[in-house]
Image (cartoon, grey):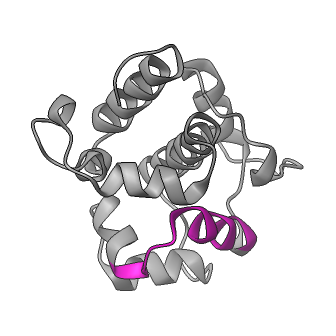
Amino acid sequence: MSTKEHPYKIEEAPATVSDVEMVYYVNSVNIASREFKFFKKLARKTDKIISEWFNISEKTFQNYKNLKTEISMPFKEKFLLLVSLYKKGELVFGSKEAFNHWLETPNFQFNNTPPVEFFKSISGIRYIEDRLTGIEYGDNA
């Protein structure tokens, strides 16, 4: 499948993305520099830390960010999942700051490690999303 230009605003990404929606986004949405700026504003992390989440070098992340290299499908998928996760976290916790604090704090539901350590895999991101849904409906944080 080829990527087509699609009018898309990252700010309007849903707080939860189904697998069907993800397939659509990955195959039809181009990530531009404004999307990277939006994500950095959500995450409030350095390029070095963000590149570790994506299992790529900081240089590769900067090339993606500066649109010097074509963005890979796995990167796009994880990028869109993380944007949605941050949006859901902000909804559940009431602010970016509170969500970022929760992500950085060791948690018994994550084997006493900070949830942010689970960003390195799609399954980990989905697990965090599941925990956020639980918190949203009354589970312990």
At x 26%, y 53%, the residue is 105
Q: Closer to the camera, 118 or 63? A: 118
| Near-viewer residue (112 or 8) | 112
Image quarter (top left, top right, bottom left or bottom right) of the C terminus: top left
Where residue 15 sits in the image (x, y, percent)? 65, 34
133 left or right of 48 in image: right
- Can you say which quadrant of the picture contains the N terminus? top right
Name the image quarter holding residue 28. Answer: top right
For the magenta stretch, what is the residue range? Answer: 34-48
Q: Is residue 78 above or below residue 23?
A: below
The picture places residue 10, in percent across and down from the top left corner, at: 75, 52
- Image vertical order of residue 9 relative to residue 137, above or below: below
140 and 110: which is toward the camera: 140
From the viewer's perspective, is 46 left or right of 97?
left
Which residue occupies the extreme right position in the image? Answer: 7
| Magenta highlight on residue 44 | yes
Residue 114 at x, y = what percent? 23, 50
Q: In this view, does 75 lie above or below 19?
A: below
Give the vertical position of 62 relative to 125 (above or below). below
**Is residue 44 found left or right of 117 in the rendered image?**
right
The stretch drawn in magenta includes residue 140: no
Q: Position of residue 98 (x, y in %)?
A: 50, 53
Q: Which residue lies furthest to the left in this view?
A: 111
* Quarter of image, res 100: bottom left
> In screen coordinates, is 77 left or right of 1?
left
Q: Which residue does the image show at 15% across and 33% down from the upper left? A: 108
| Viewer-proximal residue among 77 and 126 | 126
